[in-house]
Amino acid sequence: MHERILIVDDEPQITRVLRTSLAAQGYDVRTANDPEEALRVFHDWTPDLVVTDLVMPGIGGVEVCRAIRAHGSTPIIVLSVRDHERSKVEALDAGADDYITKPFGIPELLARVRAHLRRAPERASALLEAGDFAVDITDHTVTVRGKQIHLTPKEFDLLAHLARHAGRVITHRALLTAVWGAQSAHQPEYLRVFVGQLRKKLEAETGKQYILTEPWVGYRFVPEGLGDEKAEEQGPRD
């Protein structure tokens, strides 16, 4: 399987050059010309590495780094012009793994891409198994007690983030940022709708509750599930 690389830059000529150079090395490449599109592609496609510019319209490359890092450990290489030292530091603090100063040579970029992909976790480790669940991050599939459940891309992203932190309370803000991006951190209506849809699909198969509400705080994922009596003891659902 070819490793997936997402390129994010608002300059089309740069994305064209990088896409051509990386594809010639056998990588599966997609591009995005603005941060919002980049986060949509990231959540739907699950790349193995992201190369992103820092200075772009909209939320900018720093927020892209924060949103991606909230979702997992995907390597991030940022591209920076020489007179934006503060932005480079901010990006590294936000979760970027490396930066390359513009202008740069393609051989340098390829070498850094290879280095970060070597250090990235094996794709096989993207299988999360706990309780009644098996969540395959790479293939975007979910099975509950051996039966595959059809989820929309956003439902899958939501469940995958909860599964990565099974048993822990995840705040509304953290879930919104991880699944919808930093720009959605103050829009909890997304969560109420998608958690409700996800609960219906999971409970229809088993009659058990897996996503518990922590009032005013967030949600907790219990992969073993709770029966009706135990679920009632955990408090209300929204």
Image: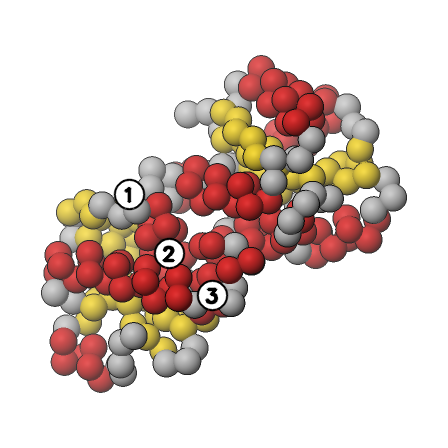
Q: Amino acid at mark 2?
A: Leu
Dot 1: element? strand
Q: Amino acid at mark 3?
A: Gln
Taking the image as drawn, is residue 59 in sight?
A: yes
Relative image position of residue 67 (x, y in whole percent)? 56, 53
| Viewer-side label of 2, 1 | 2
Labels 1 & 3 near each other (Cβ < 8 A)? no
Could you say which disc has been placed on residue 158 in the image?
2
Q: Which class describes the residues within 10 Å of circle 2: few (<14), some (14-19), or many (20+)? A: many
Q: Is residue 71 above or below residue 56?
A: below
Query: Position of 213 compared to 61: left or right?
Result: left
* Marks 1 and 3, the one that precedes in the sequence: 1
Q: Quadrant of the C terminus?
A: bottom left
| Viewer-side label of 1, 3 | 3
Residue in front for this viewpoint, 30 or 128 = 30
Looking at the image, which residue sits at the far right? 83
Q: Amino acid at mark 1?
A: Thr
Q: Which residue is mark 1?
A: 141
Could you say which disc has been placed on residue 187 in the image?
3
Give the residue at x 37% y 56%: 158
Q: Which class describes the residues within 10 Å of circle 3: few (<14), some (14-19), or many (20+)? A: some
Q: Quadrant of the N terminus?
A: top left
The Cα–Cα distance between marks 2 and 1, rounded to whole angstroms, is: 13 Å
Q: Is residue 235 above or below residue 200?
A: below
| Viewer-side label of 3, 2 | 3
Looking at the image, which residue sits at the far top? 24
Residue in front for this viewpoint, 145 or 174 = 174
Give the residue at x 43% y 68%: 188
In this picture the colour scheme is: secondary structure
